[in-house]
Image: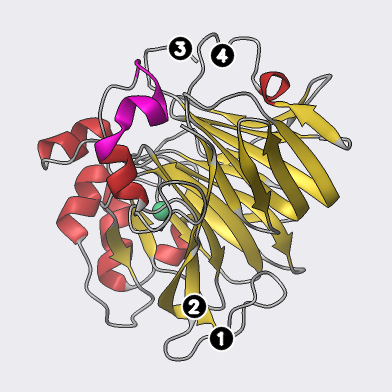
């Protein structure tokens, strides 16, 4: 199955922005746009023989072609988005795999944010301050003072922030974030600054863990790439292309078998080129899916390409 570009899906959010330029050539016509979904189940394939199908359909119909034989389930493992927050997002928490499965979902939600840009003073909440107790969390929700218990982190362009399941978190305005997360619908809103939207207090308290691994992750610079984050569910790498690079050289050593990967252009333009299929262009902030069964290809830098590669991992199955 050949690599294909995915059409981004622009999703309205009250906390979003009206004009996505220069990130995307998109202006809101109604509600502001908060999220650009790059690998959502409803995103459509933009190139190749499966053009027009949704990503959800592709995974359902061809799970092994997409993910290889090791994939434990048939659906899309990762949801990747770009977030444009102009206001504070609610304080929320996601369940881990075990809790999600208790509620009939295949997986929980561990996520991370990679800052594509950040204004001075931009910050996010990733976890609770040290020593905060569950009683204080409850009192903070009831009394409208939960903000005081949040561990705020300043955000600078290039920062990677890990938010594992169970972490109390909130995105605040000022940054443009590439969010990678397990493809799961479960979000429990625990606090909304008194704005009156629905809260899921009981479930959020069940999901909250006072101590998690959340926080900034230092990049690991290797000879041929930089590992921005490696966690049990996904690996995110920044890969210098330097004119052209073969598909084999994109893979890490420990990736023994071909699996699914995504190629994202944080900046600039790329092209996926091969004698076996028609070229697939990778525009700025665009996304190309590389199925496990893809023929070999080269990724070309067509101008200023800053390539981010994202690969799902199956916990307990190594790379
Ligand atoms: Zn979240």
Numbered badge on residue 33: 2
Residue 10 percent across, percent down from the top left: 47, 71
**Residue contact between numbered discs 1 and 4, judged by CB atoms under 8 Å:** no
In the depicted view, which residue is nearer to us: 220 or 178?
Answer: 178
* Residues in magenta, as a range: 61-70
Residue under label 4: 255
Residue under label 1: 18
Mark 3 secondary-structure assignment: loop
How far apart, in angstroms, are the residues tagged by discs 1 and 2?
A: 6 Å
Specify whether 134 is left or right of 129: left
Residue 154 percent across, percent down from the top left: 68, 57
Q: Nearer the viewer, mark 2 or mark 4?
A: 4
Q: Dot 1 surroundings within 10 Å: few (below 14), some, or many (20 or more)? A: some
How far apart, in angstroms, are the residues tagged by discs 2 and 3?
A: 37 Å
Q: Residue at x 80, y 48 (%)?
A: 305
Q: Residue at x 37, y 13 (%)?
A: 316
How far apart, in angstroms, are the residues tagged by discs 3 and 1?
A: 42 Å
**Residue contact between numbered discs 4 and 3, judged by CB atoms under 8 Å:** no
Specify whether 297 is left or right of 303: left
Residue 91 percent across, percent down from the top left: 39, 62
What's the magenta bit mostly, secondary-structure-wise? helix
**Residue contact between numbered discs 2 and 3, judged by CB atoms under 8 Å:** no
How far apart, in angstroms, are the residues tagged by discs 1 and 4?
A: 41 Å
Mark 1 secondary-structure assignment: loop
Specify whether 230 is left or right of 34: right
């Amino acid at each position: 199955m050949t690599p294909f570009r995915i059409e981004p899906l622009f999703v309205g959010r009250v906390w979003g922005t009206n004009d996505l330029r220069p990130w995307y050539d998109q202006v809101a016509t109604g509600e502001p746009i908060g999220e650009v979904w790059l690998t959502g189940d409803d995103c459509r394939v933009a190139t190749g023989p499966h053009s027009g199908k949704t990503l959800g359909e592709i995974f359902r119909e061809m799970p092994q072609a997409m993910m290889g034989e090791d994939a434990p389930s048939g659906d899309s493992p990762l949801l990747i988005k770009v977030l444009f927050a102009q206001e504070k997002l609610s304080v929320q928490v996601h369940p881990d795999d075990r809790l999600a499965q208790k509620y009939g979902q295949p997986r929980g939600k561990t996520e991370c944010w990679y800052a594509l840009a950040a204004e001075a003073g931009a910050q996010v909440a990733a976890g609770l301050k040290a020593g905060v107790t569950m009683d204080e969390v409850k009192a903070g929700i009831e009394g409208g003072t939960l903000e005081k218990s949040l561990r705020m982190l300043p955000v600078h362009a290039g920062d990677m922030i890990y938010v594992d399941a169970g972490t109390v978190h909130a995105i605040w305005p000022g940054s443009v974030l590439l969010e990678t997360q397990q493809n799961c619908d479960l979000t429990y809103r625990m606090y909304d600054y008194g704005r009156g939207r629905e809260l899921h207090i009981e479930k959020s308290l069940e999901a909250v863990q006072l101590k998690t691994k959340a926080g900034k992750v230092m990049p690991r610079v290797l000879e041929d790439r930089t590992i921005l984050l490696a966690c049990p569910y996904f690996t995110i790498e920044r890969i210098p292309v330097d004119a052209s690079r073969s598909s084999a050289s994109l893979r890490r050593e420990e990736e023994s078998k071909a699996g699914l990967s995504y190629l994202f252009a944080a900046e600039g333009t790329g092209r996926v080129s091969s004698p076996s299929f028609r070229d697939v262009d990778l525009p700025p902030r665009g996304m190309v899916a590389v199925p496990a069964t893809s023929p070999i290809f080269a990724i070309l830098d067509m101008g200023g390409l800053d390539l981010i590669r994202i690969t799902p991992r199956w916990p307990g199955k190594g790379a």
